[in-house]
Every structure is written in structure tokens, then in C-alpha cells.
Amino acid sequence: MKGLRRLSCLTVCVYLCLASPVFGDVVSDWNSIASQTILTAGPARPGPSSILDYAVVHAAIHDAIQAFEKRFAPYGPAIPNATGSQVAAAARAAHDV
């Protein structure tokens, strides 16, 4: 009985360690998706291009959110009169990149 209890505890601990964290915001979620995508691209892209890939994804997310908030200057051309959901716009921008 004691061995079964230890095995159960060990199994639960292993599953908790393997669980991926869940974030409540679109930027963190798409950062995780971009990380997985860039890492699985592997050696197909030479040099430090993965750093640039992250930068482009986050610049697109920044510009999509700033089209609504207008707190900071966008990296690309401004998007006038943005309407709809900021979350959907950021997710679409990250997905398209």
C-alpha cells in the first residue's frame, strides 16, 4: 500500500512538471506559440535568425495593440480608426507573421 501511494505521488508530480503554463494574455500566449514554432524550424535557418523572428512577431503584436490604444509610436505604418477586439487583432498579427 505504501509503495502504491509513493507511485501515485510520483506520477502526479511528473504530470505537474510536464504541464505547460497557461497565461491570461494574448502576448504571452503568442510568445509561447512563436517559441515552439521557431524551435521546431530547426537548422533550416542559419545564424541568429530566430532572434529576428521573435522581434518581428512582437513588433506586429505591438503595432496591432497600438492601433487601438495609441499610447506609443508604431514600428510600421499607423493603422487609423481601428475597431474590434485588441486580442483578436494581436492574435491575427502574430499568426500572419
Image: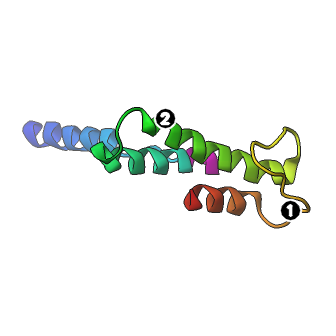
Residue at horizontal 50 percent and vertical 47 percent from the top: 22
Residue type of the residue flagged with mark 1: Ala
The alpha-carbon separation of the residues under discs 1 and 2 comes to 29 Å
Label 1 neighbourhood size at 10 Å, few (<14), some (14-19), many (20+)? some
Kindly indicate whether the residue at mark 2 contacts the one at mark 1 (C-beta within 8 angstroms): no
Residue 83 drawn in magenta? no
Pick the quarter of the image with the C terminus: bottom right
Q: Is residue 20 left or right of residue 15?
A: right
User: Residue 6 at what x, y percent from top left?
Assistant: 15, 36
Dot 1: element: loop
Which residue sits at x=8%, y=38%? 3
The image quadrant of residue 17 is top left
Mark 2 — residue? 51
Residue 25 visible in the picture? no
Q: Is residue 14 left or right of residue 25?
A: left
Which residue range is magenta in the image? Answer: 24-29
**Magenta region's main secondary structure?**
helix
Return the disc, 1 or 2, that comes first in the chain's sequence: 2
- Dot label at residue 82: 1
* Residue 75, above or below 94: above
Which amino acid type corresponds to the residue marked 2 in the rendered image? Answer: Ile
Q: Residue at coordinates 46% horizontally, 43% vertically from top-left?
A: 21
Query: Is residue 25 rendered magenta in the image?
Result: yes
x and y percent of residue 43 in the render?
28, 43
From the viewer's perspective, tell me whether residue 38 is left or right of residue 65: left
Checking the image for residue 39, the label placed there is: none
